[in-house]
Image (spheres, grey):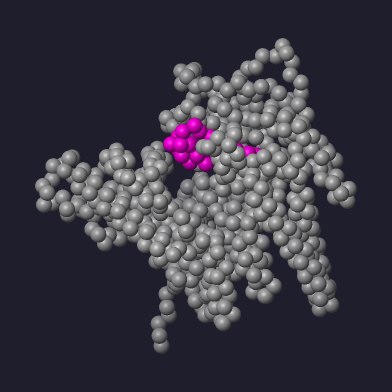
Amino acid sequence: MEPAKNYPGITSPISLEGPKPVDLKLSEKLEEAMRPHGVFESEEEMSHRMDVLHKINTLVREWIKDVSRQKNNYPEDKIDAFGGKVCTFGSYRLGVHTKGADIDTLCVAPRHVDRSDFFSSFFEILKNTPEVKDLRAVEEAFVPVIKMTFDGIELDMLFARLALPQIPEEIDLRDESLLKNLNEKCVRSLNGCRVTDEILHLVPNQHSFRMTLRAIKLWAKKKGIYSNALGFLGGVSWAMLVARVCQLYPNAAPATLLHKFFMIIHKWNWPQPVLLKALVHENKFNLSFPVWDPRVNTSDRFHLMPIITPAYPQQNSTFNVTLSTRSIMTEELKDGLEIVSKIYEGREEWGALFEPSNFFQKYKHYIVLTASAVEEKDYLEWHGYVESKIRLLVGNLERNPCIKLAHVHPSPLGPLNESDGEYLCRWFIGLTFVKIENQNQNVDLTFDIQSFTNTVHKHAYHINLMKDGMKVEIKHVKRRQLDLYVPPKILLQSKRAAVAQEHRSSIGSASKSESNQTLHHSRSDTELVRSNSMSVDLSEEISQDAESSRDSVKSGSELSSTSKEAINGDVVSGSPVPTDSVMQSPNSKREASPAGSESPVKRSRSQDDQSAVESPMNVDEITPLKEEDGSEEKEEEQQEPESEDKVEKPIVNQHVKRLPSADVPDLMSPQTNQNLPVQVMSNKNIRLKLK
């Protein structure tokens, strides 16, 4: 009798069944459907990437030799033995990179080469290399990195110094003994390679894993839910979810794995963690790095969607996920399951899964965040810095009791015309407000937005990033005003996606209604009651989706002069106001959330009422008219007249005194705040009313 095969994973597989002919045929069609989207590289492009990696690896080895000569005065016969290596990780190492994608790399150096050498002498070598463009160092980041474009290929390079006198050519970074005597920055830099290699080691079939992951990455990017920095899932997190499904169905074809992926992840009981291997708290090398464990670490208990990396020290790769982003991803997973189910029934094609998102038709209110700079070098740094802080703005908006959902689109848009300037990008955040029947509602967003701009500017000054010409501007716009910021082609794609979604919803509603009628005569009375209640709930959801889609298609492109004036006045931008109101935790809205240095004090109702009068940006919501009236909600903006006797003065936080940030120094004292410019804003009140 043959011994039982050991499969990777914390549980045994659900099914060991192999692919059927229909699964193989659908897998072939899946690959064909992905090709027009630039998922696969040509042989020439892959060869070019290999040449770039070879050149950068040669530069690293020569640099290590130079450092050895200058710092330690080693003899020439020993210098060649020190080695040094450039390792890859991320999508390139997993084998799922797309055309034009960047390459994540790690510079591994022996113990006599310091991180300071990497950001000084090696940076100078890169600066003098003709193939290198757009070079910039982010030494203050959580994981310090050098970014560049090397011969047309974008590269992100980390640095790790191992406690070894020499770096072997065939070194295995999965070996935990390499973590001995390393600081946390080196461990974090090594973690990317260690996690990627461990994922490949833990999947039973790498070919099926790669094909399924390519489809999931393409789907997530099309739906706008692919960005770790903005609170969605990044490439490693999606890879771990796919790897877990591959563990449960080790012999399945890519098409089957894709179907099982949506089926399992859509129903996953969050915050139950996703694990590829059991948590390891102790190891034979007595390493004491912190490991994700909600039983030990209080902060880990508030993670909303934990996906745990398989390499020691195991960490949650999705700590940026917020209530809004989890809700958005769950909804997209539900829609994906419906589409793939129809594909298996022969009622849909794979192309429907990769249709663009209807983001710009989905909401009636948007926040437009604009980051701009004067010089190209400053813009590259400013763009990355502002993007890393956007999740704080989403967290601020989520904590507003009048906001139901804040959905940020991860792909920024560039300037729409020449008047915008060359170095500018815009992010868009769709808003859904909590509506109260038969009651007027004031929604004040000024404090939430102003506290974000304070945080961005204050931290930029703290890390010496702020340069002349760097600006952040935030506006509130309505859907019909998006043509001032979004290219017509993207708006048209969004409208078509909304129409396609409405069509699928109507078909799904009809099929579910027929199935309920068929089951009516075959079930018992108890089952019948349960079935009817479920069908009512589903039909209500579908009708709401259809109503939202119909409203989205009715967007106009004309903008009245009154609306244009309102847009120009509806701005919260510029330099920071000297207040300390950083909002760190995206989970402070949960019950029993601990209040501390990372959890701001909540605003009282009286303070909100007072601020609503003094705020330069208010949104008044009234219950919308019924759809039978044949018109959308009419929105008006009223601007209070400005008295001639009034003098512009700095905006001071009237809401509540906030606790200082845990990771940004307190700049409230006169000594540290005296050199910061104060933004002087107009005291105009802008109210948006829906009738």
Residue 585 placement: quadrant: top right
Residue 473: give x, y in percent of width and height. Answer: 59, 33
Residue 339 placement: quadrant: bottom right
Foreground residue, 680 or 631? 631
Residue 369 forms part of the magenta stretch: yes
Vertically, is 555 above or below 260? Answer: above
At horizontal 44% and vertical 65% (from top left) the residue drawn is 42
Residue 541: give x, y in percent of width and height. Answer: 76, 58
Vertically, is 661 above or below 88? Answer: above
Foreground residue, 547 or 143? 547
- The part of the chain drawn in magenta is 367-387
At horizontal 49% and vertical 18% (from top left) the residue drawn is 674
Query: Does residue 637 appear to the left or right of 182 in the view shown?
Result: right
Query: Does residue 173 appear to the left or right of 663 in the view shown?
Result: left
- Tally the numbered discs: 0
Vertically, is 10 above or below 467? Answer: below
Say if residue 606 shows up in the picture. no
Query: Does residue 10 appear to the left or right of 479 in the view shown?
Result: left
Say if residue 435 shows up in the picture. yes
